[in-house]
Image (cartoon, rainbow, N blue to C red):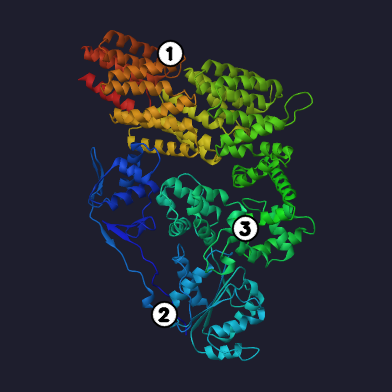
């Protein structure tokens, strides 16, 4: 008899309906007429909170506290995500409204909702079993879909083996399958636990006895076959790995002789018999490694949910804050989603607390944490579970398992051979052993890439490392591991790999760290550490891990040998460049120290591109701190040095430096020439070499400065196109700093020109979140300031000032001053518009104290705002003089955009004094010099003013 596939779900979920939408909170899915609606995670969290309080006003701070608990988040960020949510809910079918803003109070979900729920099946619904069946062990977490899939597979194929490492939850799953299928088999479900059966000869009698039959012969199977023939039966053999050969023979025999028998087997390796269908049980899903997830999002992962449930039932207390739940998520990820390991760790929360549990995971103490007293002996501790598996291995497999414990993130077959070979283990033995470990579920495989990668679970790796130390081989194979990564990274650097292949090296970061800790440790080899540091520096820089890069390069720089003539080796140059870059992007290194240090290094670094890049860093550092004359001097020296080299790369670098410095000095025409020349002559190879050396991309910054230059020259549409190019240039690099720089330039120019303030704010919030994720403080500071300026465009000065204060604080901390004069000037202008004269004066005083240049790229704009301040103080003559100075300065620099702004202010002043024709004669020629961008903010304002003057 072919049994029916169960269609009912053992669990149900709540569905909230409103309009054409259905909200599934448990799955974090919003659907509109059965189609998923794309919604960001923050917007989804906001929707959940508002729907939960439908019809009630939820305050802004309350919303922020629920969606971003424990994190400082600006109210404008909330509004950006509310705007995204509103757009997602727009139906275009009669203009239904779902969200409303209650001024001064918060937001309210106003649409009517309905909720549907379904009851859960209970044991009372099942008929009494014909054979003893253990109860469900625990409340199962995260396996419902898997159980349904196994039920379907088992009823369709009849013979399924569930394979997975010890502690993954195979028994819990098969018991759930057994109870689910009881009605389908009319109670004829027989569960046989094989772990107590130590003698292979007792396997068949144990199975026969489980059916309640007497064992009266040497081969009791014919009697069992006779008893079961013609009846639908489900037989479960749980834990067969220690009897694998006998279990394989018995299963194949019963499957062949009983057409209506269904077999479900659990094992740590495949039976490899006819009719078998393998189901590899996956670990519980764990959250990815990253800072962006909230507590609510983390709780959606089954591993975290299980951890918190078990911790609570064991008496542990966990606060559901983002930070605590994140620690729980990290623990679950480190335990590889192994259910038993998670339960054992959660059971010790009351004794140790979350932080200490996380610290102890890599120690032998974690292997001894006790579990349920009633669990089988092999499941009462992690150590016992691993002992059970280890003792089933061959001697060669044990040897290779121990040696592979030095890999942290995984290994290829080639890596396994290079590290684990020796002392009777050649290529064939290593490859066979890896295959054996995979088959016995002590290793896992990822075959999605071009070559398979294998890894040991962290708990297995800890266990194997202890065995390696007991064998006296730990130092030998940690050295082999470090030497392997030296060779791998050296080959990658010398091979000039494409960007995507070089980017893949980031996945080895934890192994590189482990190798460095050994190399610079008490029993290590500093020479290997120096090599590793020089080869791996671009990896840290790509992830904006500047503090870590600084730490390793300082260590390596202190022991790296120089040449006999005292000059730096190529290896030292790489280390010095990485150190210089990481110093520049941390708070502990002033520009004065940077310049002095660079000049010292120039005496030891040979006359190569290394010197040019060192000067480049110093020039860039001078620019961001507004020491523009010093930056230009360094740029001119680089340009002279580059003339002596045939490679176009140094020349492109020098042209960028010249263009960058001249742009900030307000010499726009010259700057544009040099910036464009840098783009024209640069090569991809030279550009990527610099990116890998210091983590900063000259092409991205060249495009950004060029966009700023052409905007000031009066070409806003060209600036917008360059903004698109700068993002397109940065994204493929997968380097955090260049992307943040690109996003900064794009957001800055949109703030200056774009009329869609909602869209501008969205881009700025993305910039802040990206920079905050990678701890890039200057870009977080600029982003906060730009958000503040967007609030001033909404005439919300009070909302802007806290954002601006935080942004300016971060910029001051990093000595990143290049945008500060313009930010303070525009804040002062908004204070004047808000009739906050005292604030305007204070902001201009801050500007005066921080603006160290007599003339630079936004001096005309500063003069214009000073004119507005004088006008606000009632001194029209002083205001007119300052406006005229701003016009003259802008015209001298070729900054048509600044000239238009100053001309508009002067024209309004003249019109207020009855001089409309004079105002028209001033403004109209300036406006007519524009050839594009007539729908941007300033040109729309100028056209409106000209219309008023013409009346």
- Label 1: element kind: helix
Q: Position of residue 470 (x, y in %)?
A: 72, 55
Q: CA distance from mark 1 to mark 3?
A: 71 Å
Left or right: where 171 falls relative to 127: right
Label 1: few (<14), some or many (≥20) within 10 Å? some
- Label 3: element kind: helix
Does label 1 or label 3 sit earlier along the sequence? 3
- Label 2: element kind: loop
| Residue position marked by numbered label 2 in the rendering | 183
Q: Position of residue 72 (x, y in %)?
A: 39, 37
**Callout in the foreground (2, 1):** 2
Q: Position of residue 101 (x, y in %)?
A: 25, 42
Does label 2 or label 1 sit earlier along the sequence? 2
Residue at the spot x=34%, y=15% of the render? 866
Label 3: few (<14), some or many (≥20) within 10 Å? many
Label 2: few (<14), some or many (≥20) within 10 Å? some
**Callout in the foreground (3, 2):** 3
Is residue 103 or residue 895 the one in the foreground?
103
| Residue position marked by numbered label 1 in the rendering | 892
């Amino acid at each position: 008899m072919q049994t029916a596939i169960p269609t009912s779900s053992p669990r149900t979920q709540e569905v909230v309906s409103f309009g054409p939408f259905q909200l599934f909170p448990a799955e974090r899915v919003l659907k509109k007429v059965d189609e998923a609606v794309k919604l960001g995670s923050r917007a989804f969290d906001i929707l959940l909170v508002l729907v939960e309080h439908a019809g009630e006003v939820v305050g802004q701070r309350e919303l922020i506290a629920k969606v971003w608990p424990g994190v400082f988040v600006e109210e404008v960020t909330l509004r950006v995500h509310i705007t995204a949510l509103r757009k997602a809910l727009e139906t275009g079918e009669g203009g239904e409204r779902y969200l409303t803003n209650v001024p001064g109070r918060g937001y309210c979900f106003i649409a009517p909702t309905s909720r549907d729920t379904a009851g859960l099946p209970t044991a009372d619904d099942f008929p009494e079993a014909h054979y003893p069946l253990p109860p469900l062990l625990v409340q199962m977490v995260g396996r419902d879909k898997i159980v349904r899939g196994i039920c379907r597979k088992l009823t369709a194929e009849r013979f399924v083996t569930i394979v997975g490492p010890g502690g993954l939850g195979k028994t819990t799953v098969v018991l759930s399958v057994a109870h689910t299928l009881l009605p389908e088999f009319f109670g004829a479900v027989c569960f046989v636990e094989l772990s107590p059966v130590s003698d292979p000869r007792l396997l068949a009698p144990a199975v026969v006895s489980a059916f309640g039959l007497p064992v009266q012969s040497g081969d009791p199977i014919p009697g069992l076959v006779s008893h079961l023939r013609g009846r639908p039966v489900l037989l479960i053999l749980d834990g067969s790995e220690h009897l694998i050969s006998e279990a394989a023979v018995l299963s194949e025999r019963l499957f062949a002789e009983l057409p209506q028998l269904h077999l479900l087997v659990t094992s740590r390796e495949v039976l490899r018999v006819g009719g078998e269908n393998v189901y590899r049980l996956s670990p519980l899903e764990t959250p990815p490694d990253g800072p962006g997830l909230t507590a609510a999002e983390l709780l959606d992962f089954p591993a975290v949910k299980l951890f918190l449930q078990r911790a609570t039932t064991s008496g542990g207390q966990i606060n559901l804050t983002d930070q605590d739940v994140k620690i729980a998520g990290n623990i679950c990820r480190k335990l590889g989603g192994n259910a038993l390991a998670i339960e054992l760790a959660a059971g010790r929360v009351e004794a140790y607390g979350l932080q200490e549990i996380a610290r102890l995971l890599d120690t032998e103490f974690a292997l001894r944490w006790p579990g349920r007293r009633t669990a089988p002996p092999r499941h009462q501790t992690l150590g016992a579970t691993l002992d059970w598996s280890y003792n089933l291995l061959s001697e060669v497999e044990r040897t290779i398992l121990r040696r592979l414990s030095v890999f942290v993130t995984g290994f290829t077959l080639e890596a396994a051979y290079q590290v684990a070979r020796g002392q009777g283990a050649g290529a064939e033995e290593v490859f066979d052993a890896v295959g054996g470990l995979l088959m016995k579920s002590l290793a896992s495989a990822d075959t999605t890439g071009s070559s398979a990668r294998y890894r040991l679970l962290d708990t297995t790796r800890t266990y194997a490392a202890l065995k390696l130390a007991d064998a006296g081989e730990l130092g030998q194979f940690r050295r082999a591991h470090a030497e392997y990564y030296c060779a791998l990274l050296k080959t990658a650097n010398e091979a000039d790999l494409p960007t995507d292949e070089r980017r893949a090296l980031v996945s080895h970061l934890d192994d590189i760290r482990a190798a460095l800790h050994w190399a610079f440790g008490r029993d290590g080899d500093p020479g290997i550490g120096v090599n590793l540091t020089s080869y791996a520096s671009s990896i840290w820089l790509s992830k904006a891990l500047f503090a870590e890069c600084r730490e390793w390069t300082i260590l390596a720089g202190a022991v790296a040998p120089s040449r006999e003539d005292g000059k730096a080796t190529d290896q030292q140059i790489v280390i010095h460049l990485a150190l210089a870059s990481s110093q520049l992007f941390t708070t502990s290194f002033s520009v004065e120290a940077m310049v002095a240090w660079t000049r010292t290094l120039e005496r030891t670094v040979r006359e190569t591109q290394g010197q040019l890049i060192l000067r480049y860093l110093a020039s860039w550092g001078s620019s961001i701190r507004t020491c523009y004359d010093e930056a230009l001097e360094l740029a001119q020296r680089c340009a002279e040095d580059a003339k002596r080299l045939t490679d176009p790369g140094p020349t492109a670098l020098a042209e960028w430096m010249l263009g960058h410095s001249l742009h900030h000095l307000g010499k726009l025409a010259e700057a544009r020439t040099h910036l464009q020349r840098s783009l024209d002559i640069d090569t991809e190879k030279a550009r990527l070499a610099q990116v890998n050396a210091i983590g900063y991309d000259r092409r991205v910054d060249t495009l950004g400065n060029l966009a700023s230059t052409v905007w000031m020259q009066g070409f806003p549409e060209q600036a917008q196109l360059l903004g698109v190019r700068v993002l397109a240039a940065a994204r493929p690099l997968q380097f955090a700093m260049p992307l943040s720089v690109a996003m900064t330039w794009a957001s800055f120019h949109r703030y200056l020109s774009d009329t869609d303030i909602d869209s501008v704010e969205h881009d700025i919030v993305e910039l802040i979140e990206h920079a905050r994720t990678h701890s890039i403080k200057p870009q977080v500071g600029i982003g906060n300031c730009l958000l503040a300026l967007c609030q001033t465009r909404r005439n919300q000065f009070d909302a802007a000032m806290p954002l601006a204060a935080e942004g300016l604080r971060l910029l001051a901390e990093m000595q990143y001053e290049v945008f500060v004069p313009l930010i303070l000037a525009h804040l002062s202008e908004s204070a004047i518009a808000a009739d906050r004269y005292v604030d305007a004066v204070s902001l201009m005083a801050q500007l005066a104290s921080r603006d160290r240049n007599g003339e630079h790229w936004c001096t005309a704009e500063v003069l214009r705002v000073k004119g507005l301040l004088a006008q606000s103080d009632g001194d029209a003559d002083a205001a007119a003089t300052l406006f005229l100075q701003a016009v003259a300065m802008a015209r001298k620099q070729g900054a048509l955009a600044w000239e238009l702004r100053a001309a508009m202010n002067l024209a309004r002043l003249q019109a207020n004094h009855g001089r409309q024709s004079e105002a028209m004669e001033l403004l109209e020629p300036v406006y007519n010099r524009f050839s594009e961008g007539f729908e941007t903010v300033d040109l729309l304002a100028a056209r409106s003013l000209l219309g008023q003057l013409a009346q």
